[in-house]
Amino acid sequence: MFDFFSARRPSTLARDAMVATSHPLATAAGLDILSAGGSAVDAALAASVTQCVVEPAMTGIGGDCFVLYAPKDGPVQALNGSGRSPAAATLEAMRGAGVGDAISRTTPHAVTIPGAISAWCALHAAHGTMPLERLFARAISYARDGYPVTPRVASDWAVHTDHLKGDDGAAALFLPGGHAPSTGALHRQPQLAETLSAIAAQGASAFYEGDAAASMAGRLSALGGLHTEEDFHDARDQAFWTDPISAEYHGTEILECPPNGQGLAALMILRILEGFDLGPDVPLADRIHLHAEATKLAYHHRDALISDPATSAGLAETLLSDAAIDALRARIDPARAGKPALWDEPEHEDTVYITVVDAEGNAVSFINSLFHGFGSGLFDPGTGVMFQSRGSSFRMIEDHPNVIAPHRRPMHTIIPAIARRDGRTWMSFGVMGGDYQAAGQAALVSAMVDRGLDPQTAMDEPRSFAFAGALQIEPGVPGDVRAELERRGHKLDVATSPIGGSQAICIDPETGVRMGGSDTRKDGSALGF
């Protein structure tokens, strides 16, 4: 029974349709579309474009997008909307431009050609039912006429003040009066409203061709980037459909987008953990320890091997094989922390996740990101576009699978997920938080499958994450558990800000009732009818 004295909220229940996002205005936009008879894809697009306005640190049309579409009947489809590097972006050109051992997030070399709009338009063409003008209407209004800054958005915004000061255009728009807007302040992005209006009327061509492409390419080139208008023209159709990868966890099938996303790491963690008891009677210290050890093993392989789809062929089959998983699982000592994995990827924490189930039972698991907070911090005043920093995850190592190269997609952290039982969608879910996403998905699935928790209760539990040679824990982890983890050899790092965020919607196989949750670490909600 739910503890109504817990100061938490229960999962949301609805009969016909539901949307869950990390921002209340985005959830409202999606619900508006569902209530008007729109599809899950229509609602997800309306919610995403709204978040690109009202949650600017986390997402934007200058970023990338991954989607899993799960129709009520038929196979799940994966859409890769990750952007590619410019045609001139060779390792030699990077070195000639003064790039050292790593690509800094604040340089134009960190900007890949944004893939979000290409993905949105491909998704809309395949499964949308309402015109883009209808889906974009609320977002355009917020950008043109203003939107109130919510508490978590204000907090994230303030953290990135110095980052925004590095670009005059970004500072002028996002630091009015020289500082980040406070909670309740109204903020406007009029040029972004114009760009969104053009995309709504003309589709992807309004972003990747004409004045918009010329403005973005010109801005990046002026900053020293290798981007050209032709790179933008070539990117109009860069999003592509593919088959998801999957693995079973105690009878529940978990589906992920294939590499270049890190969904493979989530599946590896779950397959490793499947060999251990994580049920309701297992002490919390044991669960945290086993999760940390599985995470370190999976992420070591992620960092070494995941890259562009063309260079990742067969990787999932190899790493999810019984032989590979058995070998990795055997390295875990239930009583002692193992040697940390090699953590040398850049930190990347900021994104948004959306899930929708429509009245027909179709589900969309949808994630959109700028990579770091406010991406690269480089802004194009002509279009109102803040550029992502996804190219900073490329390696400057000649023989590395994820080395920078022309028209290449880097390793991505953003990973939507679908869970199925008996061939039917059971849950559409995702976890935000950059590197944490794969580990967070595994923790959420384990809590629900191994201990029978509902989605809101599962995502509200205190979190932990083995990262950078330490075990990050949220303050809610009890003191005796902390002491036991330290006894086992973990170096603890108590988080000063929440670890990630999440949304999920479950479908009851008997009644069809939708049960949704939206992480209390964010401003959002799950709503349905």
Image: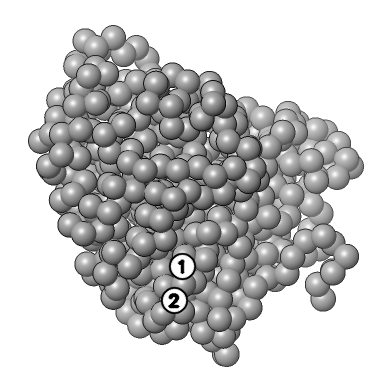
| Residue 47 drawn above or below residue 472 | below
Between 233 and 35, the one nearer to me in the picture: 35
Going by the numbered disc 1, the residue's amino acid type is Gly
Badge 1 marks a residue whose secondary structure is helix
Residue drawn at 28 percent across, 38 percent down: 383
How many residues crowd around disc 2 within 10 Å: few (fewer than 14), some, or many (20 or more)?
many
| Residue 211 drawn above or below residue 124 | above
How many residues crowd around disc 1 within 10 Å: few (fewer than 14), some, or many (20 or more)?
many
| Residue 166 shows in the view | yes
Residue 142 left/right relative to 410: right
Q: Name the residue under label 2.
A: 34
Badge 2 marks a residue whose secondary structure is helix
Residue drawn at 41 percent across, 68 percent down: 43
| Residue 330 shows in the view | no
Between 128 and 218, the one nearer to me in the picture: 218
Residue drawn at 49 percent across, 55 percent down: 353
| Residue 140 drawn above or below residue 511 | above
Between 316 and 62, the one nearer to me in the picture: 62
Between 92 and 323, the one nearer to me in the picture: 92
Across and down, in percent, residue 325 comes to 50, 51
Q: Which mark is residue 2?
A: none
Residue drawn at 49 percent across, 71 percent down: 31
Across and down, in percent, residue 362 comes to 40, 77
Q: Where's the N terminus, which quadrant?
A: bottom right
Across and down, in percent, residue 485 comes to 79, 38
Q: Quadrant of residue 41?
A: bottom left
Residue 240 left/right relative to 282: left
Across and down, in percent, residue 231 comes to 15, 36
Q: Residue 30 carries which label?
A: 1
Going by the numbered disc 2, the residue's amino acid type is Leu
Task: Give yes or no for contact between labels 1 and 2 (Cβ–Cβ under 8 Å).
Answer: yes
